[in-house]
Image: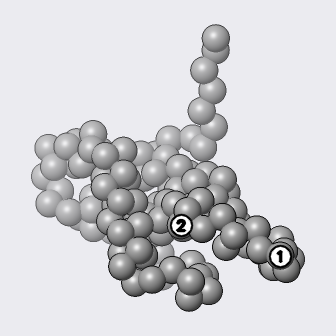
Amino acid sequence: MRLDGTVTQERLRAALVNAMMDINRQLRAFKTAASAAGHASIEAASAGDSVDGQPRLVLLYLRAVMCSAKADLVERYRDFDADGNRSRLEDHEPGADEQRRNAHWAVRDILDQSHVFVELI
């Protein structure tokens, strides 16, 4: 994730910790099921499914955490997202909504669910 140095190390760490707590909460049932199946870690749950030498589920988890943390930071630093130069728009840098969507999709991929979630009212 690209940051311009405005965010301090302490705030970045806090955003990452909060993102991990949120993603872990969303994956609680997955973790319980994986543990019941005898998988001691997310690497073990990947069952040899790897991309570029890394377990697929680990990559998806990291994506979910990074996108969630970036969305949180963009929301807290509004001027970071909407500066006078409009550099984010020119660089096509995803905003908070796109980062949250990417985090949500990564979690749904871990859960082996579709990205589309529809409920009839």
Judging depth in this view, the residue of 58 and 64 nearest the camera is: 64
What numbered label is drawn on residue 73? 2
Task: Name the image quarter holding residue 70.
Answer: bottom right
What numbered label is drawn on residue 84? 1
Residue drawn at point x = 85 percent, y = 80 percent? 85
Q: Earlier in the sequence, mark 1 or mark 2?
A: 2
Judging depth in this view, the residue of 116 and 86 nearest the camera is: 86
Q: What secondary structure is found at the residue carrying circle 1?
A: loop
Amino acid type, label 2: Leu
Residue 63, horizontal then vertical, whole percent: 49, 67
Relative placement, left or right, of 33 versus 22 is left
How does the figure colour the protein chain or chains? one colour
Residue drawn at point x = 36 percent, y = 51 percent? 22
Residue 43, horizontal then vertical, whole percent: 27, 67
* Picture quarter with the N terminus: bottom right
Task: Name the image quarter holding residue 59.
Answer: bottom left
Judging depth in this view, the residue of 75 and 101 nearest the camera is: 75
Residue 104, horizontal then vertical, whole percent: 53, 49
Asked if marks 1 and 2 touch (Cβ < 8 Å), the reply is: no
Q: CA distance from mark 1 to mark 2?
A: 18 Å
Taking the image as drawn, is residue 109 in sight? no
Relative placement, left or right, of 74 versus 51 is right
Residue 45, horizontal then vertical, whole percent: 27, 58
Residue 78 against residue 36 in the figure, above or below: below
Task: Name the image quarter holding residue 48.
Answer: bottom left
Residue drawn at point x = 50 percent, y = 41 percent? 113
Residue drawn at point x = 37 percent, y = 53 percent? 23
Relative placement, left or right, of 23 versus 107 is left
* Picture quarter with the C terminus: top right
Residue 102 against residue 70 in the figure, above or below: above
Relative placement, left or right, of 39 versus 83 is left
Amino acid type, label 1: Gly
